[in-house]
Amino acid sequence: MKTKVKEIYKTMEYGPAPEDASEAIQFLKKHNNKFNLFINGKWVTPSSGEYYDSINPSTKEKLAQISEANDADVNKAVAAAKKALPKWVSIGAHQRARYLYALARQIQKHSRLFSVLESLDNGKPIRETRDIDIPIVARHFYHHAGWAQLRDTQLKDYKELGVIGQIIPWNFPLMMLSWKIAPAIAMGNTIVLKPAEATSLTALLFAEICEQIGLPNGVVNIITGHGSTGAAIVNHKDVSKIAFTGSTEVGKIIRRATAGTGKKLSLELGGKSPFIVFEDADLDSVIEGIVDAIWFNQGQVCCAGSRLLVQESIAEKLYKKIRARMENLRIGNALDKSIDIGAIVDEAQLKVIKDLVQLGVDEGSTLNQPSWSCPKEGYFYPPTLFTDVSPSATIAQEEIFGPVLVAMSFRSHKEAVKLANNTRYGLACSIWTENINLALDIAPQIKAGVAWINCTNVFDAAAGFGGYRESGFGREGGKEGLMEYLKPRINDSFTDEPLPISINNSNSSISQSNPSLGIDRTTKMYIGGKQARPDGGYSTVINSAKGDYIGEVSKGNRKDIRNAVEAAHANNKWLNMTGHSRAQVLYYLAENLNIRKDEFAKRIVQMTNQNKSDALQEVDLSIERIYTYAALADKYDGHVHHTIHRNVTLAMPETLGVMGIICPDESPLLGFISTVIPAITMGNSVIVVPSEKLPFSATDFYQVLETSDVPAGTVNIVTGNKDELAQVLAKHDDVDAIWYFGNKEGCKDMEFLSADNMKRTWVNYGKYRNWLDKAQGEGLEFLKHASQIKNIWIPYGA
Amino acid sequence: MTNSDKKTKSYISTNHAVILHDRNEGIPFDANLFKDININRSAVERRASTLAKRRSVKKQWQAAWLLKAISCIDLTTLSGDDTQGNVLRLCAKAKSPVRLDVLKAMEMQDENIQVAAVCVYHNLIKDAVKGLKGSSIPIAAVSTGFPAGNIPLKEKIRQIEISVAAGAKEIDIVLSRNLVLNSNWKALYNEVSACRKACGDAHMKTILATGEIPTYTKVAKASWVCMMAGADFIKTSTGKEPVNATIPVSLVMIRTIREYHELTGYKVGFKPAGGISKAKQAVNWLVLIKEELGNDWLTPDLFRFGASSLLGDIERQLEHFVTGRYSASFRHPMA
């Protein structure tokens, strides 16, 4: 029955405002509602012959059948990408830029078709796909068309990785596709991408776009399927890198599966991001921020501001406003232009949400929901606020991935930071205050890759996005994001064997001629700024290369590592020093090492039996290397990104925290210096495991540390069995990163064991650097691995 | 003060029903109520820019909403060349703003569709009285040295008194911008209070001239002071500033209305003015009001458009709804 004007004039209600879906339906029909795989520029039937249904979550109606790709299909796709690679590389930066530009244009031309198809398939409101998702997709291709053009000039020290495997989630299907594909192909890689099984349609439409612009066959391959398809991509030997966005659970599986293979990895995982409201915030704007944080895309956002932390003085007032706002939200079919909230992606996710909400109620938190009820025909869940939540509640810890906000209050700024960081995740945070001093004080203290000041869920191709902690590693967007699809050209110079050293057999007299060795010396470990005896009370004899006894070192064990990690955490002084102050300390280190140059050279000779002149050169190079990092300490700047909103987007390199460093066996002093110094230059505190065979250069060095104003706990040295200690470090949940220079097996162990707390790892996969060569042994690459970038968005306007 | 809604005493008949509600009597000056206000411009603009995109009003809903918009128009002429002739024409248009055949096609011919008020300079009130004779449409007059407001307070008071005596039922006053710019809130309160007293039974709309206020924070504070001093409406602009009514500034103002209502129970009205000339804009403003203040405010008692050419565009859109053909302005009687 038609509603009359007269009636509406009285009620002033909204009517239905459906977006026309006919063109999207037409697209599905053109494929007979059945989609094959896009491999090597052609649509091929899946080897399995199997198809599964794609469902419209707003109505539970079947949209299309999607191919299930099996191992054979994955092999085909990777082979196509591998075959396409040489040509794609050789056509050069400008030609690649033209293709990316064409993709951007073509997406823009068909933007509404993409939007409607995305809303049909995913259930997200057409407003979001039309005004947010698809414009971001086009922008991403435009931005990276630019990077494609600039690769050979601005990034000339880097090269492509090869074939990239990409696995994306269902919450932002096409947007995630663009974040993966645009930088990958712009940098000269070819790709095999698997969309999420629930939401493959826009990726398949994108494949058509690739056909339309004449993208060379095999550069982009889109294969559909479930987890096993993804696993086949992850495990394929010809894939050089895996880029994954999804759950932390699967991210860990991928980390373990690729451990030791040398596959580069970027993981964008889960989150439980804090949304912090201080009492001087513009509360009505905060409310809209909350709408954007947790009711955007039904809360199915990895960086959703799902933990509301509000200053106690305004908590009740804010909760009241939130409840009123929830009442006003409209939920319905994704294609209705008058809704705020669409459908949950599928039945399984809806169940996850329902179960967690029930658990929240059972655990004693107070449930707040609007009085209206959801439509019955699809997978809907109402906006939800939990109050009276304690940090120990399951709903305060677990990612719900739904429209559910949990609220807690804090008393002081310090407590706000503590609560915010009381999580295994670290993807994003949102900070609301009208005091810029407070905002810029809090933002660096939150362990998260993105900090939004007085805004939330803002994205742009020019800014990096990615997490700390178990939210994964790697960045997407910005120059920092490009690095995930490149490798330094210098890596090709690494060797399978260590650099040969010149042996001088007449050196044997040196150890006897060293008067300091006339008196017994106990080589201790160095923990928390103090020389420390090993917990176990054992020592290990160290012989020279010739087999002569040199001395004994402490045999450190897991408790020594534990103590060292605690000492490293207790050291806030180094972290809070300015770059200039750190440089001063580093110069002082160089100065003090220089005084003892001869002694350190003799020690190298004693251990390695190499030429004295070579040993002296190693010490000189070590001093020079310290100088290099002292010089860089106040020069490794961030960026101010040119994002599209009116704001300053700061990309700040931040300290990783506490790092484990397993030193190489080559160049006993220089190997130690080359790994430890860049790590501490970025403000990290480190636990160093020196070369097991040649430990004395490192243990001698603690006397230099002691005399150079290095704060206690900055450098901790634990000697002993290299791999045993390394494994304790890799398994330690309070260690943020680990660098390992050793054999292939050890590298694999490090990456495998680090998966549990998603440590950042940097390993050499059994390859050797020439530490004497500056190009290999020092530089910005080291600082990059010793830091992570936080993007801070600061909108302005009086 | 209580939080309960006060009843409304209305002098306007809408749909033949007379709603009674109390006016905003104002409250004593209290700077603590607004001193901590800090508006985040970027966040306000973000909300403002997405508001209209979150709601779509089409077909018969659009027609009904546009008729509602007409009922909220202060049909205005404020030009140097205003004469009795054009004011009389304006009054005739105010009484029958939409062609009868168009109304009939929507079955709205018996709904007494007319504009909310006719707004003129105060020397033309007598002409408007003549033009509106026999109708319930009130006359609004701009006073207090409109548009700049730079005349002595006692002159302002005199103007109001003359206008009210001449038959104006609504007085649109302009704020002394210098008091706002210098944060002289107490003086502003006193001035607005004095004007309110001079208005007597006539309802008072206070024009903030937001285009001349440098920050949203000051717009919000000025809104508070006006409401405390007893404004029945707060209004964005005279129509003569370089920037007139915008959605973001309106959002800032109506949020203060909401807070003031929660605190005192008084419902204060809102009037955007200047630059609103398209039907689509009118719908956006109604969406803004509905979303932020609720349906209670979607009535001429609490919401007005200050507009001169808006009606013309709405008429064309309504004819399009009825016929399915795009209309031309010459097909509708001019004001």
Image (spheres, rainbow, N blue to C red):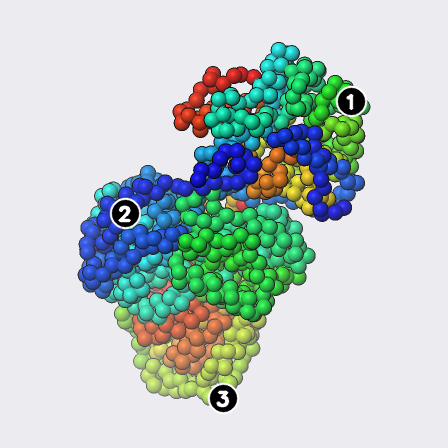
Cβ–Cβ below 8 Å for labels 3 and 1?
no
Kind of residue at disc 2 = Leu
Residue A763's place in the image compared with A150, above or below, is below
**Camera-side residue: B224 or A763?**
B224
Q: Residue at x 51, y 76 (%)?
A: A564
Assign a secondary structure to mark 3. Answer: loop
The residue where tag 3 is placed is A537
In this rendering, position of residue A574 left or right of residue A721: right
Determine which residue is flagged by label 2: A28
Crowdedness near tag 2: few (<14), some (14–19) or many (≥20) residues, C-alpha within 10 Å:
some
Q: Nearer the viewer, mark 3 or mark 1?
A: 1
SS label for mark 2: helix
Viewer-nearest residue: A700 or A796:
A796
* Residue B160, quarter of picture: top right
Residue A218 locus on image (x, y percent): 22, 52
Query: Which image quarter is the C terminus of chain B in?
Result: top right
Q: Are marks 1 and 2 in contact (CB under 8 Å)?
A: no
Viewer-side residue, A30 vs A224: A30
**Chain containing mark 2:** A
Q: Chain of mark 3?
A: A
Label 1 sits on residue: B161
Q: Nearer the viewer, residue A322 or B100?
A: B100
Query: Is the residue at mark 3 from the same chain as the one at mark 2?
Result: yes
How far apart, in angstroms, are the residues tagged by discs 3 and 1?
99 Å
Image side of residue A279 versus residue A84, left or right: right
Residue name at image x 42 percent, y 71 percent: A756
Which residue sits at x=68%, y=15%? B130
Image location (x, y in percent) of residue A643: 46, 44
